[in-house]
Image: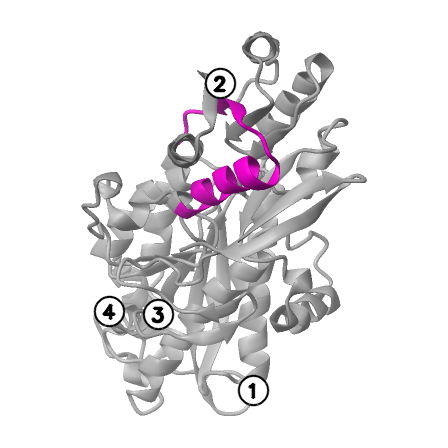
Amino acid sequence: MRHRSLLILTTVLTTGALTLTACGSRDDDTKSSGGGDTQTVVIGVDAPLTGDLSALGLGIKNSADLAAKTANADKTVPGIKFEIQALDDQAQPSVGQQNAQKFIGNDDLLGVVGPLNSGVAQSMQKPFTDAKLTQVSPANTGTELTQGNNWKTGDKKRPYAAYFRTATTDAIQGAFAANYLFKNAKVKDVYLIDDQKPYGAGLAASFKATFTELGGKIVGTDHINPDDRDFNSVVTKVKSSGAKAVYYGGEYPAGAPLSQQLKDSVKIPLMGGDGMYSADFIKLNKKAEGDIATSVGKPVEELDSAKKFIADYKTAGYKDAYEAYGGGTYDAAWSIIEAVKAVVADNDGKLPDDARAKVLEAMAKVSFEGVTGPVSFDEYGDTTNTLMTAYQVTDGKWTSKLSEAVK
């Protein structure tokens, strides 16, 4: 943590005010806001706010902002004012790592919501854990992030204590997708493609394991560059393979043109995970009809628990949709708010000196009814909510087909 000693010393000398350093006592760190004293708690938000995935990233930013504003309006934590610091990671791990250091350097920041991409999360986990700074992602599904690289063999070990998520894992999502395609869609022959990124490759591997276990056949496999937009060579391979569907481990910017070029050659559906479940997939794909995607949780539009969130989001006037991760993001931000609330209550209504460490400790016990349903975390930092939904593009929009909890 940077102490900014010179700046602090200058402020003290020029104003005569008591100013708190990172190592000082928070108990006297009050800021006047209207009537009475308040302490400011910043919640960081890391997501792709520009570029191909910005539709999802902006939905994350806005939903976290709404949680902070709601907590302030309702005085959820008396004496605490929440603010949001949002940084654009451009879906790049190197940028995410730089953002992590910026968050760590903000002494008022006690938790971070995000990122969207599992690869970006890998670059942030260690510095956040070293700083005892809580991180809660609404979107990461890479199983190794919480259960370690050997999870496939049953050797599950939590690698980073500061990492949590409100999205379930690829191990669960891939299995759910395989079951849906084999049992519900009655597809037995699949061509498997991934974008070689941690999220896409992990999701494809999980799908393959369950699909073949069920008796399905992988008739071919391939990898693509997610920055490419011409996929005719791989489409030719798919056509000659006799596949009845393509399963794609990746995200919608490449998934949309892949699907469209596939339909130009062979009339079979493309299926993917939550990285495909976006309105932009349909906007970018004139032949998306019939395509399938899975996503974490149930559609918020179908949840009684989400009615207030949807109404408040509309009232707030955000110009960007909350997208696939809106509800999960609100719950991620609210879990940090709940942890802060517990810490403040245990310290006579104020933040303690070691607020970051205390908030991290409190996260393990967080439990509340959220936008997406019950919110709590297991011993790995994974959400205990394993509800998944399968969607299909019908009449030009995503339509939910099946929702169920995965054991």
Q: Which residue is mark 4?
A: 357
228 with respect to 332 (left or right): right
The quarter of the picture where the N terminus appears is bottom left
Label 2 SS: loop
Please determine whether, in this image, residue 195 is positioned above or below residue 314: above
Q: Amino acid at mark 2?
A: Ile
Label 3 SS: helix
Residue 375's quadrant in the figure?
A: bottom left
* Label 2 environment density (alpha carbons within 10 Å; few <14, some 14–19, many ≥20): many
User: Viewer-nearest of labels 1 and 2?
Assistant: 2
Residue 120's quadrant in the figure?
A: top left
Q: Which residue is mark 3?
A: 11
Magenta region: 172-198
Q: Nearer the viewer, residue 7 or 351?
A: 351
Residue 94's quadrant in the figure?
A: top left
The quarter of the picture where the C terminus appears is bottom left
Q: Which residue is mark 2?
A: 224
Label 4 SS: helix
Q: Are marks 3 and 2 in contact (CB under 8 Å)?
A: no
Q: Which residue is mark 1?
A: 34
Label 1 SS: loop
Cα distance between the residues tagged 1 and 2:
56 Å
The picture places residue 187, in percent across and down from the top left corner, at 58, 30
